Amino acid sequence: MTVRRSFFPTLLVSLLLLFPRGARAGSLTLEQAVRQALASHERAGKAPLRVKAAEGQLDRARASFLPSLVAGANATLRGTEDRIGRQLFGTGTITLTQPLLNPSAIPQYTQARRQLAAERWGAVEDRRSLAFDTARAFLVVLTRERVLEAATRRLERARANQQNADARAQAGLASTNDVTRALLETTAAAREVAQAEGNVSTAYLELGFLVGSPVTGPLSAPDRTTRAAESGGVRAEDEVRQAEARRPDLRAAEERTAALRASAQEPLYRLAPTLTLSAQVRFNPAPAPPDTTHDETLQLNLTWPIFDAGARYGDRKTRVAQAESQALDERQIRRSVATDIGIARATLKASRESYRIAEEAVAAAKKNTAETEILYQQGLARAIELVDANARRYEAEVSLATAKLAMEQAYLELRFALGQGPTDDDTERVAQADGGAQ
């Protein structure tokens, strides 16, 4: 059982060395993963449905200004006094109603129009958040693969050291305690490999859930993203003002505030009267004198709710409070833009420095491992020092993978705070969606 488990990570590392991530044929790129998630995930599918629902509300609000046409008919079966025969009487009507003055419909239409714009911006933000979640999951997979590679290398070194300690103990050049320590290091390394394999499988499942289909790898390292995270700078035009104009969540909040403020105006419009024009044509196929076959009526209806027991003012008070609450939410989002950008920049700067230090630590740990192995061969170092050097190298490599992930994630958070997408391709797609939200 142990042989089978150790064969997989060894084979995986060999394949990774033979085929670098950036050049593996058929590998899934970050851009492809984001596109697949936007095309198949349920969150992306729900975004346009919210827009369609808002479009339906706008159509309903627009109907308050348009005429309506209603047809009606009735029939009556009436028996005669001698109960020998029955008579059927029927009439039909067609009624056309045209609102001439409906003040309340004006703010209701404005609210529906603003709400539609808010839902469009909200749909853009939903898809953007999904894209970033996919990018984060993609980077986690790559990081856990790097940890698995480091654990596998540690296991290979531990087994080589164990064989060396065995040979030295049999030759009388080392004690059996060296063999015991080497065995403990081998079992610890095997445990790390098993844990890393489980973490890789879990990360692939999480990525596959976002992408919408199982992902088995390999993944192509996002070299452009890594280079930008490592040394790229933010363009001069990417300042807070431009970020505020580009952030879909802020634009959606602005539209929601405007919609609620329009709704708060509607109760005041009820103070004005409503005026409706109604025209009706009535048909009677069997008229009795002095009735005629058809007759027409034209009515002008004026309705003026002078006093409604204070209902309009109650609605006004509630809606004003809702609008003010939403305005505070909008202001909070607006203030958070500058804070988010500042935090992301500071985090990126710190993570870049941590990544640089981690690279130096890995180089030093590799050198220490090589030197300790030579000293152990010469009998100038103990087995515990060799075990410690191997463990420290593994820790340094894991720290490097973790620091790289933190740096890449900090770069993604900066792009998110600036209102961009996780990749340049997605940024263009968001910009196109911006035009549709106007």
Image (tube, grey):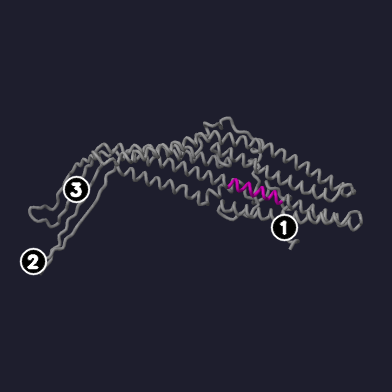
| Cα gap from disc 3 to disc 2, whole angstroms | 34 Å
Q: Residue at x 84, y 48 (%)?
A: 373
Which quarter of the figure has residue 73?
bottom left
Q: Main secondary structure of the magenta part?
A: helix
Q: Residues within 10 Å of mark 3 (few under 14, many from 20)?
A: some
- Disc sitting over residue 89 in the figure: none
- Asked if residue 84 lies in the magenta stretch, the reply is no
Nearer to the camera, 249 or 218: 249
- Disc sitting over residue 8 in the figure: 1
- Asked if residue 143 lies in the magenta stretch, the reply is yes
Residue beneath label 2, please? 81
Asked if one can make out residue 266 in the rendered structure from this viewpoint, the answer is: yes
Q: Residue at x 75, y 48 (%)?
A: 394
Magenta region: 134-148
> Does residue 328 lie above or below 214 as drawn?
above
**Of helix, strand and loop, which one carries label 3?**
strand
Q: Position of residue 436 (x, y in %)?
A: 45, 40
Q: Position of residue 312 (x, y in %)?
A: 30, 40
Amino acid type at image mark 2? Glu
Q: Compare marks 3 and 2 and give the one earlier in the sequence.
A: 2
Give the number of the mark in front: 1 or 3: 1
**Of helix, strand and loop, which one carries label 1?**
helix
| Cα gap from disc 1 to disc 3, whole angstroms | 84 Å
Residue beneath label 3, please? 280
